[in-house]
Structure formats: C-alpha cells, structure tokens
Image: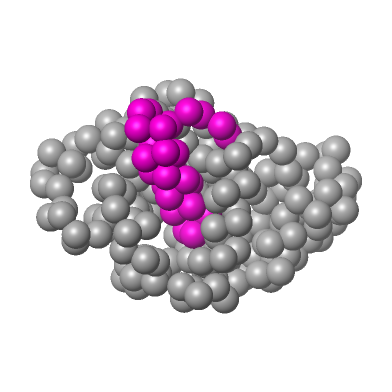
Amino acid sequence: MGGFGSLSRRCRPYRPCRRAVSERYCCVAQEQERGSNPRGAGPEVFERSLPPKGWIYPCTKDELRAALAGFPPEHLEGLHAVGLAPATRKDCWANGRYFAGPPALIELYSMACDLTYKQSPYVKRHHIERGQAVEVAYGMRVERVGARFVCCWDLEPWKRFVLGHVLAHEVGHHVYRRSRRRAVNVGATRNPAESECFAEAYALRHGEGGPHGL
C-alpha cells in the first residue's frame, strides 16, 4: 500500500488506522480511472464533500492550486493529486498526510468549525509551545479550559499555516521518497524518523517565507 507521512495536531506520534488509509486509496483509484493528468501538467487538485454541518476547509481549490504553483515543478513530478479531504471526529488529528501510493497523493484535512481542539489531559502548556512551535508562530493560541489545554485558530492564520507549512511538509515527504528511490534504484526503504526530519526541514526552506514561498 505504500508509506505515508503526516503532520499531526496532537502532541504525540499518530498513525491513521489501516481502514481509513484503504478507503482513501479506493477514492483516489476511482478518480484516477476518470483520467490522469497529462505529463508535466502538475498534480490534480480535488475537493471532497464535507459533512452537512460542523466542518470547514482551510482554503479553496483555487488557493491550493496557487500555493502548488510556488513549488519547483520537478518537486511535484510523480505526485498524482493534492486536495482537501474531510476529517472525522474519530480521525481528526492530522493536518495533512502524504500517501506514497501508487498513486502518490497529498490530503489536507478539515477542522471543526470552531477551529479548536483539546489536547490530552497529560499535555502541559510547555509541551504544546515546544512541540507545536511552528503553529504558535503562525498564530495558534493555547488556552486553558478546565483541566486541559485547548488549541485555537482564527481562519486566516490557519489558512496561512496549512498553505505555508503543512502543504510544504507533505511535498517534502514526496521529495524525500523519490530521492530515496533514485539513490537505491529500488523501492524506498522506510525510515519514518529520517523522512519526518527531511519533510520539516523542507517545509521551513520552501514554505511561506522560503525561496519558493507563497
């Protein structure tokens, strides 16, 4: 099924269940059957339907397409699709995920309309400020509600964070995987820690404020 990388809202490692991954690949396979992009045209940009109430996407398809135009074209080669996909209350901790495929794709996820989420009761403020320093720099607020800390966004800072950092992080996973495959001339060896370090460094270099930023 291929590897994947994710950028989480939770202050600890997180992986999606196998069923969720399988369902998303089925959706992409159906989209691919309807016609793939011509070579050199860049990845397809898609938006899946949200539930009727309670969820919101960080941006529009046009804004996502404009953000992708800021990356070097060679870094997007082999990437079939990038788009907006609904999170669920049971699977809502990822900001975005890269699925190696085939076909390779990136999904950026919705959030509850109040743009807030609670951390675990065991998470302290300093854990959030250290573990999610990039989010805080983009404007995420950390507030205490009862015994737990809540992370709060306004729409514009959240949009900037997703388009300026999360998207670049997931593209970084794609660049890493392709570079690994070229280096060994076989399927990429899975090294999640190395992939995460590369993707985050790529995001800081190529995301908002970098040479290819928005």
Measuring from the top left, give residue 36's x and y in whole percent. 15, 48
Can the viewer see residue 126 in this picture?
Answer: yes
Can the viewer see residue 51 in this picture?
Answer: no
Residue depicted at x 29% and y 34% = 102
79 to 152, vertically: above or below: above
Q: Which residues are magenta?
A: 167-192
Residue depicted at x 31% and y 49% = 79
Q: Answer with left or right where residue 199 lies relative to residue 144.
A: left
* Residue in front for this viewpoint, 40 or 146: 40
Q: Quadrant of residue 143?
A: bottom right
- Please tell me whether the stretch drawn in magenta is mainly helix, strand or loop: helix
Measuring from the top left, give residue 35's x and y in whole percent. 11, 46
Measuring from the top left, give residue 106's x and y in whole percent. 39, 48
Question: Is residue 184 located in the magenta-colored stretch of the structure?
Answer: yes
Colouring method of the image: one colour
Please state the total of marks drawn on the protein image.
0
Measuring from the top left, give residue 163's x and y in whole percent. 48, 66
- Image quarter in which the N terminus is found: top left
Q: Answer with left or right where residue 3 lies relative to residue 185.
A: right
Q: Answer with left or right where residue 7 lies relative to residue 125.
A: left
